[in-house]
Amino acid sequence: MATKITMPRLSDTMTEGTVATWLKKVGDKISEGDILAEIETDKATMEFESFNSGTLLYIGIPEGETAPVDSLLAIIGKEGEDISGLISGGDATAAVSETKVEVSSEPQTTNEKPQTKELPKGVIVVTMPRLSDTMTEGTVATWLKKVGDEVKEGDILAEIETDKATMEFESFNAGTLLFIGINEGQSAPVDSVLAIIGPAGTDITGIAENYKKGGVAPSAAPVATEQAATNTPAAESTTSTDGSRIFASPLAKQIAKDKGINLSQIKGSGENGRITKSDVENFTPSASVSTTVTQPQTINNEPQTTTVKPFVPAGETFSEEIKNSQMRKTIAKRLSESIFTAPHFYLTIEVGMDEAMKSRATINTIPDTKVSFNDMVIKACAMALKKHPKVNSQWREDAITINYHVNVGVAVAVEDGLVVPVLKFTDQMSLTQIGGNVKDLAGKAKSKKLQPAEMEGSTFTVSNLGMFGIQSFTSIINQPNSAILSVGAIEEKPVVRNGQIVVGNTMTLTLACDHRTVDGATGAQFLQTLRQYLENPVTMLA
């Protein structure tokens, strides 16, 4: 059966999109995960992948044309299948509307949908939005409104955890929140009923049930009164001892949990008294508040805090189950796909860092300038990739894409796992620009403020564990990239120079390559060029 693909909502503010490039043509075979097109949103140009397999039977929006979210983008099905009923008259909007009249389990990517029966006047059904191009389901981290609350256009309804970040989701409608379909901590597929908004007192019986997707009913029963809303389950950390609701960001909750802090004792400085990260970090709990103890540690001269777990007597077992976040699920899926589909091989070199250390010290004497060794590695990679574009490539079944622009992804460790913000056109940045951008993006990543557009489009990735004292390691390729560089620590050790043993500083670099696109000699030549830049940093300023 043919499947309609509609213009996706690739950002939280996107209302229409432009097809920049079609990477497939009618008649091409499509596999799940293939990139169908590049779509220009209000924030960036992003790759749009297929979640279906089959033959591309129809293209509804030609290259260069703009269409609203949910317009018919393409149809995928069996070769020779009759799709005239879906595209009759060439009117994509009519085709979409026609299919929506039926009660179907086929996913739609709109945020608000018409019902199989007419909705009461003023009632709007809000569904789980698609907040990133790879998002298939979302988790409600926090509800900022409760049933019975008045909602204005632009109000933040909830914080939704995607496969990439936790994002605020705002309402595009005004009214009263009549129904919550997905409770805090619960996950649901894109397009599941998230909430219903409408005039106060409206009877919404049966509306949510008619929106069930794939035979799965919404996770909560309709609630029409504020009294019933108080019975809605909520996380322990968001309810005070007197039963009143506590508003706190997901990061604030996590920090409070790690430190053993009771959120009910913190006064929030955010909107409507919402507790923020800084509120938790600046709070000093009394001795009676916490049942856990934190002990300071130092790693690389930086203070760390470790939560002491309960004492377990000898001979007894103790374990803790932690629910997998959307980010952790996606990391597991993507890295498994990468290691099992891309034939990895690894190349390792040792780089002398004495000159780099001298250059960095000189650069950092300039007022308001702070350049790290990682910034120097990123700059060197960008310049080396310009000379060896085959390393800056992507594998497709029918062709290899050689990228002549350089977008370096920088792996950043966050609470739930790992994210890779991207420095667009890295080769055109100075060292200080790279340093400033990395610091800004890393800060956003740790506070969960990264936008999907800031994590898209990488052509090469750098992962640095040297700051943790790791001498060398290997990384799994961040597909669709063809390579990732693993950066180890700078070590002071005996080295041989001009036949003499002297004390020097060296750093180990390991390049993981996809053998489908990068041959051994190609990767080796890239590393030779990279070494030249790092051992002679002045050449990066030419």
Image: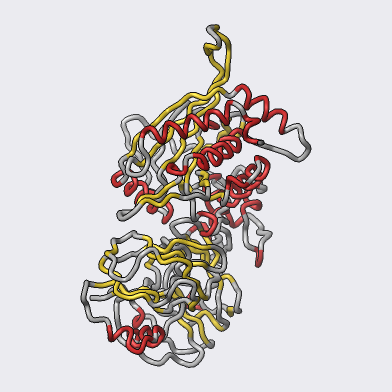
Image quadrant where residue 304 sits = top right
* Residue nearer the viewer, 240 or 80: 80
> Dividing the image into 4 quarters, which one contains the N terminus?
bottom left
In the rendered image, residue 449, in percent from the top left (x then y), is placed at: 57, 56
Residue located farthest toward the top when viewing the structure as drawn: 500
In the rendered image, residue 129, in percent from the top left (x then y), is placed at: 46, 70
* Residue nearer the viewer, 179 or 468: 468
Q: How many marks?
A: 0
**Residue at horizontal 34 percent and vertical 83 percent from the top:** 210
Taking the image as shown, residue 117 lies to the left or right of residue 165, namely: left
> Dividing the image into 4 quarters, which one contains the C terminus?
top right
Taking 425 as reference, is 207 above or below it? below
* Residue nearer the viewer, 471 or 202: 471
In the rendered image, residue 217, in percent from the top left (x then y), is placed at: 32, 75
In the rendered image, residue 84, in percent from the top left (x then y), is placed at: 28, 85
Image quadrant where residue 316 sits = top left
**Residue at horizontal 29 percent and vertical 80 percent from the top:** 104
* Residue nearer the viewer, 276 or 147: 276
Query: How is the structure coloured here?
Result: secondary structure
Taking 296 as reference, is 269 above or below it? below
Specify whether residue 153 is in view. Answer: yes
